[in-house]
Amino acid sequence: MSGEVTWSELTSQPDAQRALIARLLSGALKLPVSLDDFDEILLLGSGTSYYLALALADWMRRRGRAARAVPSCEVLLDPWETRESDTRRLAIGLSRSGKSSELILAEKKLSDAGFVTLGVSCTEGSDLLRVSDHGLHLPEGYEDGLVMLRSFTSMLVAVQWLSGTAEDHKALAQLPEQGAALLANQADAITKAANAREFNRFVFLASGPDYPLALEAALKIQEMSISTSEAYHSLDYRHGPKACADDKTAVVIFALSDREHGLSLARDVKDLGAAVIVVGQDAAAYADVADLTVAGSGVLSAGQAAALSILPAQIFAFATAMRLGCEPNAPTNLSKVVVF
Ligand SMILES: N[C@@H]1[C@@H](O)[C@H](O)[C@@H](COP(=O)(O)O)O[C@@H]1O
């Protein structure tokens, strides 16, 4: 079947998280450095791994750490990040393959500039783990397929856990079960929604901890279904991009923290003729306006639910690839890793 590898990796995410959490609970998986030893944390990666960096920087900032994300290529091309500094700085490089050239070169550059470096990768013995001062290997996220699915959520949950509180651990421990329930109960409805119209424009709107997920969702549609897609900070959509919406547009909204603003945005999008799909912990509140809602249990914060909230978008991208006759494991013009 077309898409077999991708679908099996997509649906294996709850199991991968379960295995990861068992290792975290047993204490076998630990951070090789103490985050408390650093004044500043820079997270970097390319493609999906950059969006992962954005999500983790947001997570760490909300837990009181001075964390930022930059794409690896900017470290390479913009000397700003490697300026001299007396602060204690940690660079966390994220990469499924541990091979992306920009990241390897950026980690070396940051190391020369005085950063302590930590590499997080799903690939044993990868270049990233070798060139970094410290390494965190997460085999649970390893994938044969081209698109990053399980690797994204595995690296996300592991680093969230390792930089989170006891309360976060309780919340994150619920992810495997909730993910499995979402796949069992809602994958068909999401697939149906993706096939409801001949969509040719895909828009993802989100705010706060969900914004990196909107970027990742847009990338998944591009990679799997070779379609152009867009992601915006939620209310910014009204400031221009909405001009392009029509009845062939699918707009996925990650439920906003402010329900009133979220509902008003969803109504506006609906009035443009677009199909509206709302995902996330508060999605049920949008049932009257949305074509489909994929709700969470409502007990997790948006950040804690990130590995769950991305699932509907991954399923939607996969279903769109199938509708358009694309093999998501062999996208045009793309390789699994960019090495130069
Ligand atoms: N086409 C792939 C992307 O899908 C991937 O997100 C990126 C980062 O890969 P890695 O995490 O292995 O560094 O590399 C390539 O560009």
Image (cartoon, rainbow, N blue to C red):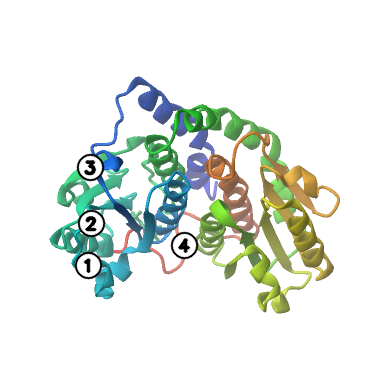
Mark 4, residue position:
331
In space, the residues marked 2 and 3 are separated at their CA atoms by 22 Å
Where residue 135 is drawn, which disc sits there?
3
Give the vertical position of 205 relative to 302 (above or below): below
Q: Nearer the viewer, residue 237 or 224?
A: 237
Q: Nearer the viewer, residue 42 or 220?
A: 42
Find out whether the residues at labels 2 and 1 contact each other: C-beta distance under 8 Å: no
Find out whether the residues at labels 4 and 1 contact each other: C-beta distance under 8 Å: no
In space, the residues marked 3 and 1 are separated at their CA atoms by 21 Å
Find out whether the residues at labels 4 and 2 contact each other: C-beta distance under 8 Å: no
Name the kind of residue labelled 1 in the image. Answer: Thr
Sooner in the amino-acid sequence: mark 2 or mark 3: 2
In space, the residues marked 4 and 2 are separated at their CA atoms by 43 Å
In the displayed structure image, the side of residue 281 where residue 23 appears, left or right: left
Given this view, does label 3 or label 1 mark the residue nearer the observer?
Answer: 1
Picture coordinates of residue 27 (x, y %)?
Answer: 32, 23
Q: In which quarter of the image is ligand 1?
A: bottom left
Q: Residues within 10 Å of mark 3 (few under 14, many from 20)?
A: many
Given this view, does label 3 or label 4 mark the residue nearer the observer?
Answer: 3
Q: Residues within 10 Å of mark 2 (few under 14, many from 20)?
A: few
In the displayed structure image, the side of residue 131 where residue 311 appears, left or right: right
Sooner in the amino-acid sequence: mark 3 or mark 1: 1
